[in-house]
């Protein structure tokens, strides 16, 4: 179990932090929760996601979990999404998008809808 959530939860608020987190995917699984800052429902997901990572042994050695503001790093997020993903941040509203990076490659973009959160997270992390 991770001892300190600050070791596995990073807030991305600028392009440099985004680049740094993608770079960390060379050695860890990097999951970036991309959402609108004004969306209370998206913000409410953070404690649940944090708890999932805290349940893993040595999570800080295996995962980096980030929360990225679409309003601040939207261009980086959109550029990372595959063209055929049909995800357009301008039309997304307040549904969170999870970007899973491994070896600097976006290997899994997940757009959550109204589904049980725990079920969705198990598919992302397992």
Image: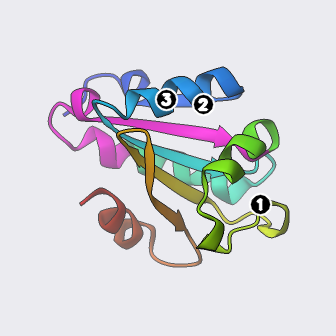
Name the side, left or right, on which 104 lies relative to 12.
left
Image coords of residue 113 (percent x, y)? 59, 76
In depth, the one of 111 and 59 nearer the eye is 111
**Residue on which the image places disc 3:** 21
Tell me how far mark 3 sits from mark 2, CA to CA.
5 Å
Q: Is residue 101 magenta?
A: no
Image coords of residue 35 (percent x, y)? 68, 51
> Which mark is first along the chain, 1 or 3?
3
Tell me how far mark 3 sits from mark 1, CA to CA.
20 Å
Looking at the image, residue 69 lies above or below residue 113: above
Give me the residue at 30% from left, 34% from top: 28
Q: Where is residue 88, by image quadrant?
A: bottom right
Asked if marks 2 and 1 touch (Cβ < 8 Å), the reply is no
Name the side, left or right, on which 4 lies relative to 105.
left
**Residue on which the image places disc 2:** 18
Q: Secondary structure at mark 2?
A: helix
> Which mark is first along the chain, 1 or 2?
2
Asked if marks 3 and 2 touch (Cβ < 8 Å), the reply is yes
Q: Secondary structure at mark 3?
A: helix
Picture quarter with the N terminus:
top left
Picture quarter with the C terminus:
bottom left
Looking at the image, residue 48 lies above or below residue 9: below
Q: Residues within 10 Å of mark 2 (few under 14, many from 20)?
A: some
**Residue on which the image places disc 1:** 89
Tell me how far mark 2 sits from mark 1, CA to CA.
16 Å
Label disc, if present, on residue 9 of the rendered structure: none
Q: Secondary structure at mark 1?
A: helix
Q: Where is residue 57, by image quadrant?
A: top left
């Amino acid at each position: 179990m991770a001892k300190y959530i600050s070791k596995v939860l990073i807030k991305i608020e600028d392009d440099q932090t985004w680049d740094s987190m993608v770079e960390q995917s060379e050695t860890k699984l990097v999951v970036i929760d991309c959402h609108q800052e004004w969306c209370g429902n998206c913000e409410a997901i953070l404690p649940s996601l944090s708890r999932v990572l805290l349940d893993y042994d040595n999570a800080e050695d295996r995962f980096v979990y980030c929360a990225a503001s679409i309003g601040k790093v939207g261009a980086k997020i959109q550029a990372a999404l595959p063209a055929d993903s049909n995800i357009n941040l301008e039309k997304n509203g307040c549904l969170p998008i999870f970007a899973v990076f491994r070896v600097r490659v976006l290997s899994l973009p997940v757009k959550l809808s109204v589904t049980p959160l725990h079920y969705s997270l198990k598919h992302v992390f397992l």
